[in-house]
Amino acid sequence: MSPETESYLSHLAVFGVRLGLSRIETLLLRLGNPEKKYKTIHITGTNGKGSTARFITDALKASGIRTGLYTSPHLECYEERFEVDGEIISEKDFEATILEVKRVTDEMATEGEECPTQFEVLTAVAFLYFAKQKVEYAVIEVGLGGLLDSTNVIFPEISVITNVTLEHADKCGGTLDGVAKHKAGIIKENIPVVTAAQGMPLEIIKKVAAEKNSKLYVLGEDFFVEKDEDKLIFSDNMGETFNYSLKMNAPYQRENSSIAVETLSVLAKQEPRINKETSLKAISNSVWAGRFELFNGVLLDGAHNPAGMSALRKSLDEIYPNVHRTFLLGVLADKAVDEMAETLLRPSDEVIVTSPVSERAMKEEELLLIVKNHTGKISVAKSIEEGIVELKKCEGLKIACGSLYLVGEVRRLLNLKS
């Protein structure tokens, strides 16, 4: 990425998160509404959005459908957020598309329009790039919430809500009820919805779906997934039964993959090119960096909230029940860090605390004070690189988690040393 582009994106970051659709709608209108030139699948949820998007994208591609994928945040570089048929955008195309969007944002500023945020600009880049690449479907991951997220300008073929727990409540109504309403905000009139939500959030999703006349498919009510030795068995109320396996072997991927299978089954009713056998094979072979990924001797997982930590802990307990664990842990200050540490850690675990590469990062000294209440041996790394050096000295399973910003930098540094 050129210094000019990096400077432009850094400048936009100053505006922070500002939910609302007026800026992105104006920007896209001036770009010719590229988001209307292909079909879309819209995905929100507290956790599992990226993995579910990956499964669906791989399956569509395997069925011979030209498919775009937009996810966030990235691990190592902005270009990772934009894919067409499994290939990330080239630096040249990224620069060119950014420049095209920037010309429009400059016009908006000159005419007194409110400046779009960084995420809104990147979303416009995705929509424009996919149109230029003539994709047939684009799988679009929500950035934050749903109702007022800048991706919520699309009218998808199907909406997906993976799950709902309390995160970003400060921007989404202040309560779990408010968060659920924001997630349900992606539901469109007469458009089917697939979800694995439970409890009160599910009741809110059911209410909104009924108001929108949208057919709802719920994990545990309309479709099911079970583990049988080394394979998964998917079934639904229509009598369909599929067997498949997963290369992404974390237990939490069973739920994500079942959401993807159900989404594809529903979509297949209107898209005859979706092939069951090739789709399941693609899902079985899907990989997603930084999600329970064993990379150069370190297990990388993007768990960054209590629900994510619970999923990671269950995965570790199932796959590595009796192995000594050492964590390189770095978190963002706006997370429920004490609950995250309590959920993740055993008294026997070792922890090296550090800070992710983010202006929102919790300082390692502050994290130390929280973590020491939940486990025994703790040390501090003043940098992620120092943390990796110390982690490599430890016995047993080595894990980096707490933030995707941390995981991305760990992965980058491990890659440099390989």
Image (tube, helix red, strand yellow):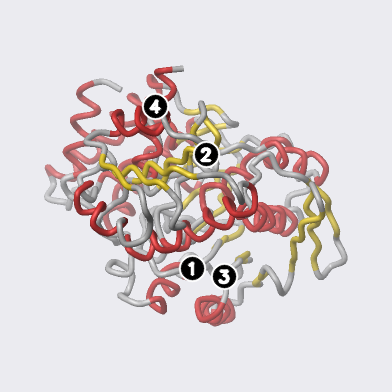
Q: Secondary structure at mark 2?
A: strand
Spatial CA distance of label 3 from label 2 is: 32 Å
Q: Earlier in the sequence, mark 4 or mark 2?
A: 2
Report which residue position mark 2 lands on.
397
Depth order, front residue of 70/247: 247
Q: Amino acid at mark 2?
A: Leu
Q: Earlier in the sequence, mark 4 or mark 3?
A: 3
Q: Amino acid at mark 3?
A: Ala
Q: Is residue 32 visible?
A: no
Mark 1 or 4: the one toward you: 4
Q: Is residue 64 found left or right of 35 in the rendered image?
A: right
Residue beneath the point at 26% across and 53% down: 367
The answer to the question of whether label 4 and label 2 lie on touching residues, with beta carbons closer than 8 A, is: no
Q: Amino acid at mark 1?
A: Val
Report which residue position mark 1 lands on.
164
Decide: is 192 above or below 320: below
Decide: is 194 above or below 56: below
Depth order, front residue of 114/299: 299
Q: Residue 35, how many percent across, how many down?
A: 46, 46
- Which mark, residue 197? 3
Q: Amino acid at mark 4?
A: Arg
Report which residue position mark 4 lands on.
412
